[in-house]
Image (cartoon, helix red, strand yellow):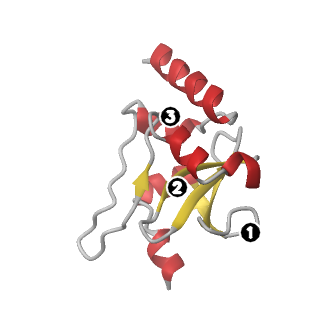
Amino acid sequence: MTDDREEIARRVEAQVRVRPPAALLDVWTGVRTVDTEAADEVVDLALYGPDEIAERNLTYEIAEYAPDLLLIGDDGGGRGLFVAGNDSDPEVVLVGLGAVGSDGGTRIGRLSSLLESGFRALVEAEG
């Protein structure tokens, strides 16, 4: 598992020039799961996998507009989930995908905490 994890991290870093955070590698390698469903709310969330993250970052021109950030997912409503590169447990920032580079976004919490809570902070960020 460790070899796979490092290989995935190197491959993604080679494609997007930002090393994926440890917590995201945990999801990709099955160490951690994300439960976005609860009895009273479902969080609309797409966390990109290692095979699609480069394409999404390229499509939204993240390297050009926000070179220190990595787009790791979206909320299904036009906002991207971004993390600062090379931080093992980064702060996640919610930014409109049409405003990358011009909007500081909304900080919604540390990636590890968001993974544990099923990204419930997305519901609060909408309010």
For marks 2 and 3, the one nearer the N-term is: 3
Question: Which structural element holds mark 2?
Answer: helix
Quickly name the residue at label 3: 25
Count the labels in the image: 3
Amino acid type, mark 2: Ser
Task: Point out residue 17 in the picture as x, y percentages from the top left corner.
Answer: 70, 33
Question: Which structural element holds mark 3?
Answer: helix
Quickly name the residue at label 2: 113
Amino acid type, mark 1: Gly
Quickly name the residue at label 1: 104
Taking the view exactly as shown, the residue that stands out farthest to the left is 39
Task: Point out residue 44 in the picture as x, y percentages from the top left corner.
Answer: 36, 66
* Circle 2 Cα neighbour tier, 10 Å, few/some/many (<14 / 14–19 / ≥20): some
Cα–Cα gap, marks 2 and 1: 21 Å
* Circle 1 Cα neighbour tier, 10 Å, few/some/many (<14 / 14–19 / ≥20): few
For marks 2 and 1, the one nearer the N-term is: 1
Cα–Cα gap, marks 2 and 3: 15 Å
